[in-house]
């Protein structure tokens, strides 16, 4: 009986508040004011409180951002390539600290060596990065790193900070359209902090290790990017502190070594990727 009473109280008062607000809005003697208030009430109901996002809300936000991102980048229509990356990602997702998220892994047709993630399980891998990786373990290390950002809710933290700076957050939170806009801009253009990079590396290494891929692949891929001739690879320009991160990864591997060396077959990986991409 007490449980029923508590549930009733939990839903009754918020419902009364909404009904009261709508009643005031609809019965006000100034029609123009009523029209102005309705969108504000609706916007408040649709607001995201970035400090207390549920998993379902985060997935919804990630889905909305994905729709916008698909207008900004060219998602590959190569089903074989997307299926390969999705299958690899889901293999890693089993060992994520957030396996309840509906992870989605997509390939972006772009020669730049880059990858990024948003929220709610959405990860994006450039074709340039797929071709730059020497083997599946190196590719898996990058995907695991991006999943580390999702685990740590790093973009959500950046969005919250940016909303405060821009003065667009209200007492109810951030409207869906503004949240999507800020999130997409941050994901595509702005770098993560060094703290977030170290955290994503540690989380990614854990995922990689539990999936039995070679730990060394995360270090070897980062080293190769550092030595890339010409301009700095996009993934390093948006992920600062590569040298220090390598040292940190080596220390973590030394403290918790794994005997598993899966995914280091360079020849089969290169043949597979080139046959699919080209």
Image (tube, helix red, strand yellow):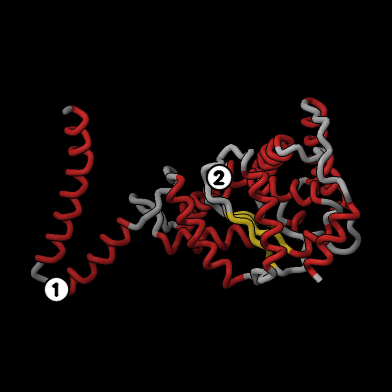
Identified at 52% across, 43% down, the residue is: 100
Determine the image quadrant of residue 220: top right
Looking at the image, which residue is at 58% across and 37% down? 97
Dot 1 falls on a residue whose secondary structure is helix
Q: In this figure, what is the number of numbered marks?
A: 2
Provide the residue designation for mark 1: 31
Please tell me which of labels 2 and 1 falls first in the chain: 1
Measure the C-alpha gap from mark 2 to mark 1: 43 Å
Residue 194 appears in the rendering: no
- Please state if 73 lies on the left or on the right of 38 as rendered: right
| Residue denoted by label 2 | 153
Whether residue 23 is visible to the viewer of this picture, yes or no, is yes
Residue 6 drawn at (x, y percent): 21, 33
Camera-side mark, 2 or 1: 2
Q: Secondary structure at mark 2?
A: loop
Query: Mark number for residue 202?
Result: none
**Which one is in front, 84 or 40?**
84
Q: Position of residue 209 (x, y in %)?
A: 74, 36
Q: Residue 189: where, in percent of width, then height? A: 64, 62
- Residue visible at 52% across and 62% down? 65
Query: Do residues under tags 2 and 1 come within 8 Å of each other at their CB atoms?
Result: no
User: Picture coordinates of residue 139 (x, y %)?
Assistant: 77, 51
- Estimate how packed mark 1 is, as few (under 14), some (14 to 19) or many (20 or more) residues with alpha carbons within 10 Å: few
Q: Judge left or right: residue 177 versus residue 1.
A: right
Q: Which quadrant would the C terminus be assigned to in this image?
A: bottom right
């Amino acid at each position: 009986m007490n449980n029923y009473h508590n549930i009733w109280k939990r839903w009754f008062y918020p419902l009364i508040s909404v009904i009261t607000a709508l009643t005031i809005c609809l019965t006000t003697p100034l029609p123009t004011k009523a029209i102005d208030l309705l969108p504000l009430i609706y916007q408040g109901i649709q607001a995201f409180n970035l400090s207390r996002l549920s998993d379902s809300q985060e997935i919804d936000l990630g889905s909305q951002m994905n729709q916008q991102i698909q207008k900004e980048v060219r998602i590959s229509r190569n089903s074989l390539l997307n299926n390969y990356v999705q299958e690899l990602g889901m293999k890693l997702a089993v060992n994520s600290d957030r396996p309840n998220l509906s992870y989605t892994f997509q390939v972006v047709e772009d020669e730049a060596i880059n990858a990024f993630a948003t929220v709610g399980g959405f990860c994006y891998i450039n074709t340039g990065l797929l071709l730059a990786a020497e083997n599946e373990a190196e590719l898996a290390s990058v995907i695991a790193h991006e999943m580390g950002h999702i685990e740590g809710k790093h973009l959500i933290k950046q969005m919250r900070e940016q909303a405060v700076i821009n003065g667009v957050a209200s007492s109810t939170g951030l409207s869906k359209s503004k949240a999507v806009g800020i999130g997409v801009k941050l994901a595509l253009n702005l770098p993560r902090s060094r703290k977030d990079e170290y955290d994503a590396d540690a989380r990614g290494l854990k995922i990689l290790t539990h999936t039995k891929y070679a730990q060394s692949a995360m270090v070897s891929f980062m080293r190769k990017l550092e030595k890339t001739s010409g301009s700095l690879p996009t993934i390093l320009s948006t992920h600062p502190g590569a040298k220090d991160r390598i040292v940190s990864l080596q220390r973590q591997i030394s403290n918790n070594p794994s005997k598993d060396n899966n995914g280091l077959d360079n020849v089969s990986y290169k043949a597979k990727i080139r046959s699919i991409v080209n």
